Image (cartoon, rainbow, N blue to C red):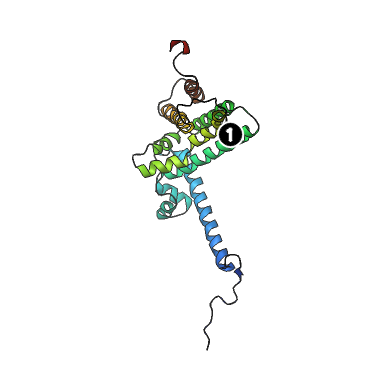
Amino acid sequence: MPGINPLDGVQFCTENAIPWGIMDSTSLRERQKERRRARIYNVAIDLFKRGGFQTTTATDIARASNVSRGTFFNYYPYKEAVLLDYGSEVMNRLRDHAESRLHDGTPPLTVLYEVWDRLADENTRERDLFPPLAYEVMNPNPERARTAYQALPLSKVIELILRPMHQAGMMRTDLSLQRISNLIADTYLMVALRWSAYGTERPLQEEMRLALNLLLEGAVKRDAR
């Protein structure tokens, strides 16, 4: 008696020969995983804002998300990784704004100051979230620092903004555009971190504009050189 093919009667997607039932099941699992990750993320950010990042534990997040502690770590290997998703969202919004404004013909330096101000406003609203996020970029664990750097590509946004000026010969040539962008991004990180941790008499936006002006114009008078 011939054997029974367990896939008899199952429709196939002819393009890649994957059974429709199996493909649908895989897609459903992926959507469920995405929804669960989104729920954990939203709950965690809410807890961070209400109770503080340092006092909120992975157990708190898991319990409030209705998942096990192990499930939380399946999605986020450490608590700070949740903040990387938050920072990545901020960077995506900044990049979208920069691309839109450049496409409209807005001068690059105007766009740079707009992005600078928007980022300062975000950090001011979420002052407690910024220090642990910034510390991840400087994490002594090189793998975690690299992950944070990739999730928070501020230098790439700055490079995008300044590229038209670089192509027009308006930027200095002894440094690459990438290095200039990295230096500007690093300056933002350090100034904002100091402001978040210690505070000053000036608002963060004013502090950041002062720092950016200094970077773009220099600290030494031209006639003093």
129 or 224: nearer the viewer: 224
| Residue 124 horizontal side relative to residue 143, left or right | right
Q: Is residue 184 left or right of residue 168?
A: left
User: Residue, x 48% and y 26% (percent of image)?
Assistant: 173
- In the rendered image, residue 5, in percent from the top left (x then y), is placed at 54, 79
Look at the numbered disc 1 and give the secondary structure of its residue. Answer: helix
Q: Is residue 33 visible?
A: yes
Percent coordinates x, y for residue 163 in the rendering: 55, 32
Quadrant of the rendered image containing residue 13: bottom right
Of residues 108 and 141, the one drawn nearer to the viewer in this rendering? 108
Q: How many marks?
A: 1
Residue found 55% across the figure and 35% down from its top: 94
Quarter in which the C terminus is drawn: top left
Q: Residues within 10 Å of mark 1 (few under 14, many from 20)?
A: many
Q: Which residue is mark 1?
A: 98
- Residue located at (62% from left, 35% from top): 100
Q: Residue 42, image x and y in percent? A: 51, 45
In terms of depth relative to the viewer, which is nearer, 106 or 84?
106
Quarter of the image for residue 106 reads: top right
Tell me residue 87's x, y (percent). 49, 39
| Left or right side of 205 for 135 | left
